[in-house]
Image (cartoon, grey):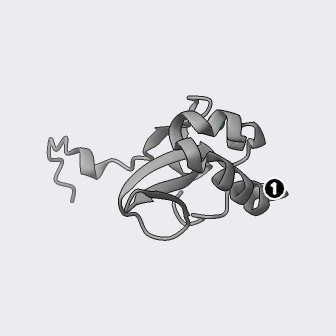
Amino acid sequence: MQTALPVTSPSAVRHVPERSCVACRRRRPQGEFVRLTKVGGVWAIQTGHRSGRGSYLCFDTPACWTEKRMKRMFGAQAATLSAELTARLQGVPRPSITPALE
Ligand SMILES: [Zn+2]
């Protein structure tokens, strides 16, 4: 019944893309990050569909959202983004921005 084809197409394999945190450089599955995108020269926290240039920060690690650590990547916007991330993510137990990803 089966036709075993020697297909080695990468798209056939269920693949969880790995990303690394811009603050601590840890590599994790994409679903464990909060994504920030730069659109029109301005960084913003992204919760919906993907577009633009993205950077990732650990979803569950407040140390990665401090202004000090974010400054390297986000420059003058680090303070604003840090405050926004803290307000949004603090107290959130596990990644829930992209629940369907895994
Ligand atoms: Zn991190």
Q: Among all residues in the image, which is located at the extreme right?
A: 91
Q: Position of residue 41 (x, y in %)?
A: 40, 56
Point 26% across, 51% down: residue: 11
Point 56% across, 29% down: residue: 25
Residue 95 vertical placement versus 58 (above, below): below
Q: Quadrant of the C terminus?
A: bottom right
Q: Horizontal placement of 70 versus 5: left or right?
A: right
Residue 53 vertical placement versus 25 (above, below): below
Q: Position of residue 1 (x, y in %)?
A: 21, 60
Q: Among all residues in the image, which is located at the extreme bottom?
A: 48
Point 60% across, 34% down: residue: 23
Q: Position of residue 4 (x, y in %)?
A: 18, 47
Provide the residue designation for mark 1.
90
Instruction: Give, as a three-letter code, the residue at label 1.
Output: Gln
Q: Nearer the viewer, residue 74 or 65?
A: 74
Q: Horizontal placement of 89 versus 15: left or right?
A: right
How packed mark 1 is, by other alpha carbons closer than 10 Å (few <14, some 14-19, many 20 or more), is: few
| Disc 1 element | loop
Q: Horizontal placement of 66 versus 22: left or right?
A: right
Q: Quadrant of ligand 1?
A: top right
Asked which quadrant contains residue 6, the reply is top left
Point 62% across, 64% down: residue: 97
